[in-house]
Amino acid sequence: MNKSELIDAIAAGSKLTKADSGKALDAAIDAISKSLKKGDSVTLVGFGTFSVGKRAARTGRNPQTGKSIQIKAKKVAKFKAGATLATTVNK
């Protein structure tokens, strides 16, 4: 499912127009992104938790040349599925 298909599904399930559903989805994604950028986690009970993790600096290898390279530390977005979502997926 891509974003436009998700917007269609939201519109069908909520009786909103596609335009309003798109705005609602964009607002939700923006709110989650801003919260993660601040370092906070976002918990949607039954669905899951979005959080920020840290990936340590490490030594990698350039596959073309075989030469060692340093990969910088960075923050990564993480998602852990909630119990209801996990149960639904495994049915």
Image (cartoon, grey):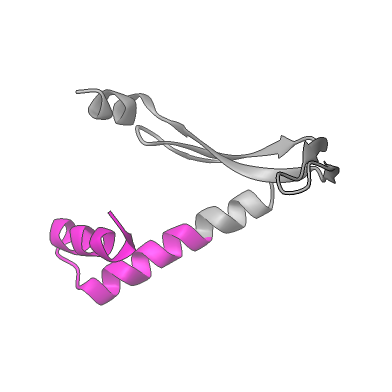
Q: Is the magenta stretch mostly helix, strand or loop?
A: helix
Counting from the top left corner in percent of width and height, residue 51 is at 58, 39
Quarter of the image that includes the N terminus: bottom left
Q: Is residue 65 above or below residue 15?
A: above
Counting from the top left corner in percent of width and height, residue 3 is at 33, 62
- The magenta segment: 1-30
Does residue 37 appear left or right of residue 16 in this picture? right
Q: Nearer the viewer, residue 79 or 38?
A: 79
Magenta region includes residue 19: yes
Say which residue appears at 79% left-offset and 35% top-offset: 56
Q: In this view, does 76 lie above or below 82?
A: below
Q: Which residue lies furthest to the front in this view?
A: 65
Does residue 38 appear left or right of residue 3 in this picture? right
Could one spot residue 40 in this view of the protein? no
Counting from the top left corner in percent of width and height, residue 13 is at 15, 56
Q: Which of 57 and 44 is in front in this view?
A: 57
Say which residue appears at 14% left-offset and 64% top-offset: 15
Q: Is residue 5 above or below residue 80?
A: below
Does residue 18 appear left or right of residue 68 in this picture? left
Counting from the top left corner in percent of width and height, residue 28 is at 43, 59
Q: Residue furthest bottom?
A: 19
Quarter of the image that includes the C terminus: top left
Q: So how many labels did they put on this image?
A: 0
Could one spot residue 72 in this view of the protein? yes
Say which residue appears at 32% left-offset and 69% top-offset: 22
Q: Quadrant of residue 68?
A: top right
